[in-house]
Image (cartoon, rainbow, N blue to C red):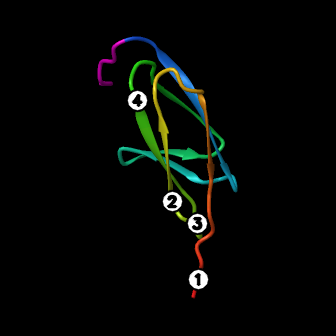
Amino acid sequence: AAPEEDGAMIELELTSEPAAAWVIQDGVVYGKTPLTVPVAEGRACEFLIKKDGHQPQRLRWKPGASTTLSAALVAEVKP
């Protein structure tokens, strides 16, 4: 059963450059960017954006902020 949430759900649009990065929250993989994820309207949340060959990036959202989040991933430097 899904946990009970206070208030309505809204959808966040997550994008990344480059695209097709994994979107992970609390160990749950939601899929690859671009992606729309439902969240509780009144609760802040954080996503981990990961793509092979790039440094992972965290995207944070808080109530009242834009519902579009974008990660600019930086390529890992290989020695």
Determine whether the residue tagged by mark 2 lies in a helix, strand or loop.
loop
- Residue 7 appears left or right of 34: left
In the drawing, what numbered circle is on residue 44? Answer: 4
Upstream in sequence: badge 4 or badge 2 = 4
Q: Quadrant of residue 44?
A: top left
Mark 1 residue type: Lys
In the drawing, what numbered circle is on residue 54? Answer: 3
Determine whether the residue tagged by mark 1 lies in a helix, strand or loop.
loop
Q: Distance between the residues labelled 4 and 1?
A: 35 Å
Upstream in sequence: badge 2 or badge 1 = 2
Place of residue 72 in the rendered image (x, y in percent of width and height, measured from the top left): 64, 53
Q: Give the range drawn in magenta.
A: 1-6
As for residue 71 lying within the magenta part, the answer is no
Q: Give the number of the mark in front: 4 or 3.
A: 4
Q: Are marks 3 and 2 in contact (CB under 8 Å)?
A: yes
Determine whether the residue tagged by mark 4 lies in a helix, strand or loop.
loop
Q: Name the residue under label 2.
A: 56
Place of residue 21 in the rendered image (x, y in percent of width and height, measured from the top left): 60, 54
Q: Mark 1 points at which residue?
A: 78
Residue at image point 46% right, 47% down: 24
Place of residue 42 in the rendered image (x, y in percent of width and height, measured from the top left): 41, 19
- Residue 75 appears left or right of 49: right
